[in-house]
Image (cartoon, helix red, strand yellow):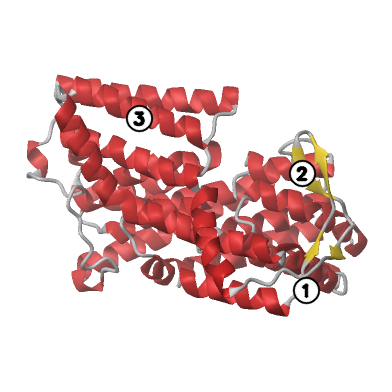
Amino acid sequence: MLFGIIIFTAILSHLLPAGSYERELVDGRQRVIPGSYHTIEPTPLSFLDMFRSIPGGFQSAISIIFVVLASGIMFGILEKSGMIENAVGTFVKKLGHDRRMLIVVIMTFLFGFLGVFVGYENNIAMVPIAAITSLALGGDLMLAAGIAVGGITVGFGLSPVNPYTVGTGHTIAEMPMFSGWELRTLLCTMGLGVLAFFNVRYFKRILKNPKRSMSLGIETKGFDLSKDLKSYSMSANNYLLLGIFVFGIVAMLYGIFTFDWYIDEISSIFLMISIAAGLAARMGGREIAETALKSVAVVAPGAFMVGFATSIKVAMEMGNISDTIAFELSEVLSTLPTYASAVSMSFAQCGINLMIPSGSGQALATLPIMIPLGEVLGLTRQTTILAFQIGDGVTNLFNPTLGGLIAMLAMCRIPFDRWLRFIFPIIGILLIISWIVLLFSVYIDWGPV
């Protein structure tokens, strides 16, 4: 599927004119200058260029690829120690199987809040916890993906305090940072509620008929509980390892919010946790090394897919067609009435997100164009940013060029095509709800505060 998209991108580079916006450096970041679009010398991808985009994608995504490997090593060592299994088994035992639907709802919102307040790629290492918990409850790996990948993606995409999308948008629009959080909080909560409802419905369906599971045939080794639920308890060493893990995560969050740490620093913390946990679990150097290599083998296919997916973005950059598509979409939007333009602007961002999967990168590339256009069409700046956020955030649930999504699905061992079958009905409901909220913002002439 991903290779097919690369081929399609190469074909588009021969059909669409190459073009570019002029950009200026603002606060250390490149920002598009509105009205500066111009065509440039065509750069259609040759047969060789199409394949060159693949190693280029791996080079571009190397940080995300490594954080997948580092998180896999960390959880491999923690899993080898028995701490994660004992912690999840004890948690499920204390709440009881009769409350497992409630656990699914709580876990969905918990991962959603991680997306809201912690970020996206920052949460990759938390995904296996959902996998172990789902199997302990009697669910499957697709339910785990619905809880963790769905929760993090919806929470991050519709977050009222997302610094990459809302924060960048408010900076460009010269508005109070994170203003209008009330309406965005309502939308985010409704989105997580819809996801929780679908997760519970899917869980009930596979409990009634296990053959309807969408993860049949996928290896669950390493995620399954190895003994009866009643026999689980936490030892002193388990608590020590849990403390090391929690301390490491807290240190990571402190660095993210205080020192602007990102992927490389997060990977470093995961490696520190891995070594500390291995020593605390009384593993020798050889055992730590062997566990790390086995863990890398488990997550390597997902890490490979991250680089492969990023190749699509690289191919578009090589063909210089991303700015052309953004320009043509803005030209179409300029002819629409107010309400239709708001929804269409959101829909256009869905398409642009496939080419520019970075939230902040997409904001810097499109909002300098969309904000003035929105004002011409009668949209407030707040509404334009909301349209952008919806288009970017909801599309993240199925964006094959988004490295973080591919990485988290890999941590759950869920193939991308199966994920699409699971998530598409949810995406439809989310878009309808989001567009209703967007139309409401147009109706009330939603202002900057």
Callout 3, which amino acid?
Answer: Leu
Looking at the picture, tell me which residue is in the foreground, 367 or 61: 61
Quadrant location, the C terminus: top right
The residue under the point 58% across, 67% down is 49
Q: How many marks?
A: 3
Q: Which residue is mark 2?
A: 30
Looking at the image, residue 187 sits to the left or right of residue 320; the answer is left
Mark 2 to mark 3: distance in Å? 32 Å
1 or 3: mark nearer the eye: 1
Q: Residue at x 86, y 61 (%)?
A: 37
Q: Residue at x 44, y 66 (%)?
A: 423
Residue located beneath label 1 in the image: 17
Which numbered tag is attached to residue 271?
Answer: 3
Give the quadrant of residue 94.
Answer: top left
Callouts 2 and 3 close, C-beta under 8 Å? no
Q: Is 309 rendered above or below residue 253? A: below
Q: Earlier in the sequence, mark 2 or mark 3?
A: 2
Q: Are marks 1 and 3 in contact (CB under 8 Å)?
A: no
Per the model, the C-alpha gap separating discs 1 and 3 is 46 Å
Nearer to us: label 1 or label 2: 1
Mark 1 secondary-structure assignment: loop
